[in-house]
Image (spheres, rainbow, N blue to C red):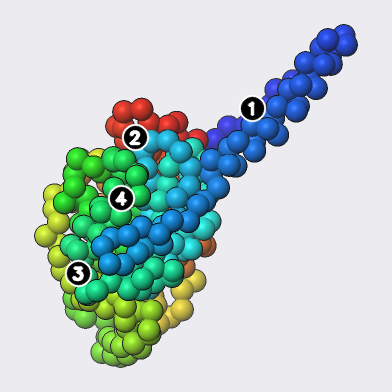
Amino acid sequence: MLTSIRYPLLACATAAGAAIAGAHQLARPHAARQVAALAAPRDEFVNLGGYKLHTVLAGRGKPVVVFESGMGDDASSWEKVQPEIARSTSTVAYDRPGLGKSDPSPEAHDLRQSAVELHTLLHKSGAPPPYILVGHSMGAFIVRLFAFTYPRETAGLVLVDPSDERAEERLHATATKEQWDAYQDFMKKHLADPMMRAEGHVWSTQSEAAAAAPLPDVPKILLSASDVASAPAANQPYMKVHMALHREWVDRTSRAELVMVPTADHYIQIAAPDAVIAAIRKVMKDAVVPGASDAK
């Protein structure tokens, strides 16, 4: 819990005191401008050998916080979170191939290739390990694969309403025929969207995430959208399945914490950005990173 501390105002009785106070007031906006300059995002296009990925870098310090978007989403899905985290450390967000401002890749990616691609992007962009990886929805599969593949380069994980590789099987076992048919119809239309088609192969290989265990012994927070009652009736069975799977994942994973966020919105980073920011800061505080910035 944050506590507000009120400091008493000191009256300046002399001209010298007034001059010092005036200088202090002038320095404060200058310091604020310096912080803003450090946090200001800059766009880069990183060449990965025949195609370039649009990357948004902001902030300075350690550890580097890396944002991985959900299926069909570009870096802008983190626009309410990345600038705040960039006030205290380095951050990286990017558009996967064929999304946003990035080039399409020469070949279709599976989850493992997406994790390797992220690793290459981070090193080519000059972002040093270790990393705190923040993944939303399908992006959580990618950061889990990354953490499993590169455990020494992973300092922590934040999963934002993550997809689960067992969700469809669990939903099929628990939903009514009407609910299951409605879900299949939705997914057929969802995956037919041009933005989703670019990532269809990544989605189809989500079973690779199941083999990515155990994860490194680093702090992990899973944020789960929990306001089922406010969700459309058609979404409620799927939300309940996901909430149950989120609990199960936390229970079997070392140093994992579950945070139930009172929203029905899958995009917690947009609907409740403060919850995501707080989770990242907590993982930053708990992570062991030599020379790390203070999480504020």
From the image, state whether disc 4 or disc 2 is nearer to you: 4
| Percent x, y of residue 222 | 33, 53
At x 25%, y 52%, the residue is: 119
Which amino acid, by three-letter code, is at mark 3? Asp
Sequence-wise, which precedes: disc 1 or disc 3? Answer: 1
- Estimate the spatial distance between the alpha carbons at disc 3 and disc 2, rounded to whole Å: 32 Å
Q: Which mark is residue 124?
A: 4
Q: Is residue 274 visible?
A: no
Which amino acid, by three-letter code, is at mark 1? Ile
Residue at the disc numbered 3: 110
At x 35%, y 49%, the residue is: 125
| Percent x, y of residue 229 | 46, 71
Q: What SS does tag 3 mark?
A: loop
| Percent x, y of residue 14 | 87, 9
From the image, state whether disc 1 or disc 3 is nearer to you: 3
Sequence-wise, which precedes: disc 4 or disc 3? Answer: 3
- Estimate the spatial distance between the alpha carbons at disc 4 and disc 2, rounded to whole Å: 27 Å
| Percent x, y of residue 181 | 28, 90
From the image, state whether disc 4 or disc 3 is nearer to you: 4
Q: Answer few, some or many: residues within 10 Å of disc 4's Cα (few below 14, many 20 plus, some between 14 and 19).
A: few
- Estimate the spatial distance between the alpha carbons at disc 1 and disc 3, rounded to whole Å: 50 Å
Residue at the disc numbered 2: 286
* Front in this rendered view, residue 53 or 192: 53
* Front in this rendered view, residue 261 or 31: 31
From the image, state whether disc 1 or disc 4 is nearer to you: 4
Rendered view: 137 above or below 274: below
Q: Answer few, some or many: residues within 10 Å of disc 2's Cα (few below 14, many 20 plus, some between 14 and 19).
A: some
Residue at the disc numbered 1: 5
